[in-house]
Amino acid sequence: MLHPMAPGKPKILSVATATPPHYFPQSRLAELAGYSDAQRSGFFANSDIEGRYLWLDPGHVRTDESAEELNDRFQQGARELARGAALSCLERAGWSPGDLDFVATTTCTGRFCPSLDAQLIHDLGCRSDVQRVHVGDSGCASAMVALQQAANHLAAFPGHRALVVAVEICSAAYYLDDRLESAVAHAIFADGAGALALGSAGEGPSVIEHRTLFRSEHLDAMGFTYPGGRPRVTLSKDVRRIGASMMKEMTATLLASHGLKQEDVAHWVLHSAGRRVIDQARRLLGLSDEDVAAARSVLRRYGNMSSATVIFVLEELLRRTQPVPGDWGVMMALGPGFAAEGALLRW
């Protein structure tokens, strides 16, 4: 039955994640990156990250891959992890690939043509009439954009079943240079995939509302450039300040539209962007350590997997807590643009 407080709203019916087979302690990754100075190696040591999963063979790690080699590795890893997360998510929902009416995919760390949605539809064996969309190059916020597209589809077609898959092979966006922001990126980003199954009936939080917040004056704060065809991260030190303030503004907007106060929110699903972003968001929003425990746990165990991260946080929150009917939740992620993407959830 539909939740009486959210008639007709799409629901997140299952969540699943997938990681590469090889786990690298943070200290080992600092060695592999080749940083010997105290400042750059300190980015690794002070990240609050214990280790990360990367789509790399531990015995054959290189820092001189060509643009073609990087994208080949991206394609292999992205297809494998996307398929794994998708199948786990479908199994938890009690669905088969043939049940899907809509697939939304997202990634920003490599290129496919045909795009990732077409690759996944092939790899899963979906119906030939399945509808799809691919959200590209929206960075860490793009799983929320894909979720919005799936929710919009289900609002138009309430009986349909939708799948959202976010996958990133951040290790394939590797550019070694002298910039401090490159070292910061290499110290925090990781590989992984997350999936969400959405439908109109069943158990799970309803997606009550989506909001997007842009601050285009910060367009250059985050993103990629492509010198020589290879992806190079742009990551301003101002992101922690900009992002946290936008999270606060997003929260106020979502709650005000439904006459809610912050104390009405029982569950916080915050993108694990980095230690300082989480710290600043906690302070600005007045959250408790428990409110950000899921975000901190994901950062510590996995690092920042760009778009997939917020799905890992949702899975971790559901593992740690047992939401009850009527509970409110806020789910947010940040990305280039500069943008905050948020959703108001209700169990």
Image (cartoon, grey):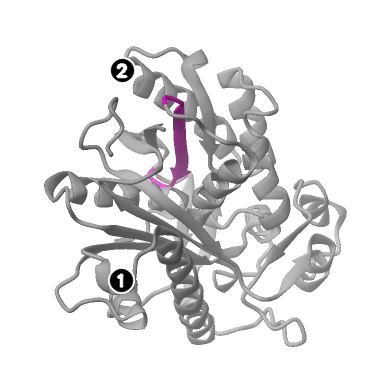
Assess disc 2: are there few (<14), some (14-19) or many (≥20) residues with their C-alpha within 10 Å of its C-alpha: few
> What residue lies at 38% left-to-right and 47% top-to-bottom?
12
Q: Main secondary structure of the magenta part?
A: strand
Q: Is residue 98 above or below residue 69?
A: above
- Is residue 333 shown in magenta? yes
Q: Is residue 175 above or below residue 80?
A: above
**Helix, strand or loop under label 1:** helix
Image mark count: 2
> What residue lies at 53% left-to-right and 30% top-to-bottom?
267
Q: Is residue 287 left or right of residue 73?
A: right
Place residue 24 in its image quadrant: bottom right
Front-most of residues 143 and 344: 344
**Helix, strand or loop under label 2:** loop
In the rendered structure, find residue 258 and report the number of the disc placed on it. Answer: 2
Reading the chain from its start, which is encountered first: label 1 or label 2? 1
Q: Which residue is identified by label 1?
A: 117
Front-most of residues 32 and 75: 75
Q: Magenta stretch: give its range.
A: 326-337
Image spot of residue 298 (x, y percent) = 65, 49
